Amino acid sequence: MRRIGAIASLAGVVLLLGACAGDPSPSTPAASTGSPGAAPGSPAAAGEVQHSPNAKLVANVPLSAPFDGDEAWGTDLAFQGDYAYVGNYRGFTIHDISDPAKPKVVTRVVCPGGQNDISVSGNLLFLSVDEPRDGDTCESDQGDMLEGWEGIRIFDIADKTHPRYIKSLATSCGSHTHTLVPGKDAEKIYLYISSFGPAPEAKNCRPPHDSIAIVEVPVRDPAQSKVVAEPVLFTDGAADDDSRPGATSGCHDITVYPEKDLAAGACLGNGILMDISDRVRPKVLQQITDTENFSIWHSATFTNDASKVIFSDELGGGVAPTCDAKTGPTRGADAIYDITEDRKLQRRAYFKIPRNQTSAENCVAHNGSLIPVPGKTVMVQGWYQGGISVVDFTDADHPKEIAYVERGPVGDDGEPTVGGSWSAYYYNGYIYSSDITKGLDVISIDDPITDPAKSVKVDELNAQTQVSYPE
């Protein structure tokens, strides 16, 4: 989602609530309808869940106190062992998913700051804060828009029931998202900080902002983490990311493929391919623009063999209803690009979900990940109120949806209300979706195309840090 300004005042201290403290039990939807294949059907009604026959919502853990107030929105996901970590504008939640059909809340940690984009590595958890605060701790309140603190917070999660706040780091223009990058040895990890939105009068976010920040984290002593580089990726000097087509003032998100020493950046006005063989000195190999169809380059996903990359366009900033006939199939969509032998990007095709949504439903391409199907490129992706979509990109010129699950509009009065799937990722046999207002969804998929993925198990998943799976 775009940086859309400060949310309502969210004061508070670090608060830990176990699942036994009145948290709702997982539930399945009261109303559920199947649809033939993955073809478009009649729009779902408010409170209704529609799905293709090969996909099913098997569990939902609703948002609950203290994450039940206005704009206590669920955001991104990360995974580790039997746990799912879910960001929220008010903090983060740790879920026990050892039984995917019966997920349980282990802890809810109150630590306000949009968006609280999240990642995990070993005993460390990282949160992105892209909202000015009056301090860097979890007790902070809204801060001055031009002088407030923004950046990265670091937690120790060795004890899942009591995460411990370690420290924070301020970064230029805050941290809208971050990407975990393993070092060349096990002693260090790095965070690539994506941020944007400079203003001439801002204290810590002045134009031009054509760079990212790189944080070095010593694994054994994370309290010594520091910003070690701020490489300039662009030279257009754009003061405003909307000032002209193709201009940019920072990156929205970066996906890395460390085994391949590659990164793909979705940088508002354009997409980039980078060589990250030197982790603190990334080198831009190519910049591409698509001024006809792409409005906000939002995120990227490599194919398993790194021969292609799929970029998404967040037309409307995540709050607009762009999944309709008027907007069309190539805007607010995915675009798949070949990576040539000389590491250049060449566009092949676009994909957009085939089900038109109502004018009350924010819907656009958002966060997703590969499903580890040997020999194929299959991806699951969140589309806000367009639900979750499973797409076969193996034929890069003719991508095809093969499964979906979606709810009807969040509101029942026909008025636009923000909601839907922020992120949808495949992890060890199931799809997990962070719904902005509904909480954690667990989805099963049973299809001859995706069934081989069930034999692939991983110990950790940060979707923007890709690792190879067996072919």
Image (spheres, helix red, strand yellow):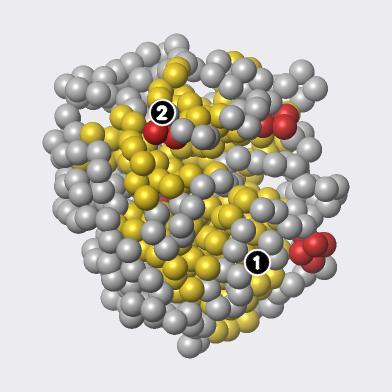
Which badge, 2 or 1, is on the more N-terminal residue? 2
- Identified at 24% across, 63% down, the residue is 70
Q: Which quadrant of the structure image shows residue 249?
A: top left
Q: Give the percent coordinates (x, y) of residue 329.
A: 57, 50
Amino acid tagged 1: Tyr
Q: Give the percent coordinates (x, y) of residue 449.
A: 80, 63
Q: Give the percent coordinates (x, y) of residue 393.
A: 73, 49
The residue that mark 2 highlights is: 224
- Identified at 74% across, 35% down, the residue is 306
Q: Secondary structure at mark 2?
A: helix
Residue at the farthest front position: 220
The residue that mark 1 highlights is: 430
Classify 10 Å Cα crowding around label 1: few (below 14), some (14-19), many (20 and above). some
Of badges 2 and 1, nearer the viewer stands 2
Q: Which quadrant of the structure image shows residue 409?
A: bottom left
Q: Nearer the viewer, residue 79 or 205?
A: 79
- In the visual, does 421 lie left or right of 165? right
The answer to whether marks 2 and 1 mark residues whose Cβ atoms lie closer than 8 Å is no
Amino acid tagged 2: Gln
